[in-house]
Amino acid sequence: DAGITQSPRYKITETGRQVTLMCHQTWSHSYMFWYRQDLGHGLRLIYYSAAADITDKGEVPDGYVVSRSKTENFPLTLESATRSQTSVYFCASSPGLAGDAQFFGPGTRLTVL
Amino acid sequence: AQKITQTQPGMFVQEKEAVTLDCTYDTSDQSYGLFWYKQPSSGEMIFLIYQGSYDEQNATEGRYSLNFQKARKSANLVISASQLGDSAMYFCAMREGADDKIIFGKGTRLHILP
């Protein structure tokens, strides 16, 4: 019972490089979310998806791209990484009904040099 | 304006004492949901408890209870008989109406002292 997994768990990259963070869930949840967590800001929503091929912007979408061709996968791509994108990234999923909580992956710590 | 406010950036509590973590929220929707999550030092986000705006009873899950005061727009988390393992960051969160998104507060760091 893997639940929700993220890869890689740690990544160091350089400014200007493209980076893709992977998220995979085994629950067949409709909804998936990407957050970044930074000191002093809590969790901020980057993008989310209500179903395959449906995505929408969150609070801080600039510099990020998502896709959802399959229900179970929701990759997040930083097209040209910047130092300000150094953060811990969390993926989450939810069945989507009103009282449903979001369940989180273990996080990816990304450092952009 | 912030939708979720957690006024206590940090708290220190003696082991076995009860703890109340404050959370106030701002919404004009009649239908909404409130959540609490725990983030230990290992980093994972753990769902603790949920309260719906129409729920008349305060939610409880083991040692966790949610003190829901609708008129005051407050949803405080109460941890009874605190344990060392309760030391963590705690986040309050809200989903408004039919919105797909959950908005998180900035968190309270709880330290349980032996």
Image (cartoon, coloured by chain):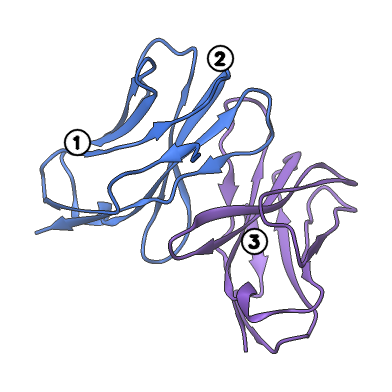
Chain colours: A purple, B blue
Residue at 39% from the left image edge and 50% from the top image edge: B107
> Could you say whether the residue bearing mark 1 is in a helix, strand or loop?
loop
Say which quarter of the image contains residue B74: top left
Residue B51 located left or right of residue B69: right
Residue under label 1: B80
Residue at 55% from the left image edge and 23% from the top image edge: B32
Measured along the vertical axis of the image, is residue A96 above or below residue A86?
Answer: above
Q: Are marks 2 and 3 on the same chain?
A: no
The chain identifier of the residue carrying mark 1 reads: B
Which is nearer the eye, B43 or B22?
B22
Q: Are marks 2 and 3 in contact (CB under 8 Å)?
A: no
Residue under label 3: A5
Measured along the vertical axis of the image, is residue A77 above or below residue A33?
Answer: below
Residue under label 2: B30
Can you name the residue that lies furthest to the front here?
B1
> Could you say whether the residue bearing mark 3 is in a helix, strand or loop?
strand
Disc 2 to disc 3, how far (Cα)?
A: 35 Å
Q: Given this view, does label 2 or label 3 mark the residue nearer the observer?
A: 2
Question: Residue A27: x and y, percent?
Answer: 69, 44
Q: Are marks 1 and 2 in contact (CB under 8 Å)?
A: no
Q: Are marks 1 and 3 on the same chain?
A: no
In the rendered structure, which amino acid carries the disc numbered 3?
Answer: Thr
Which is nearer the eye, A62 or B32?
A62
Residue at 15% from the left image edge and 40% from the top image edge: B81
Q: Given this view, does label 1 or label 3 mark the residue nearer the observer?
A: 1
Question: Residue B84: x and y, percent?
Answer: 19, 56
In the rendered structure, which amino acid carries the disc numbered 1?
Answer: Ser
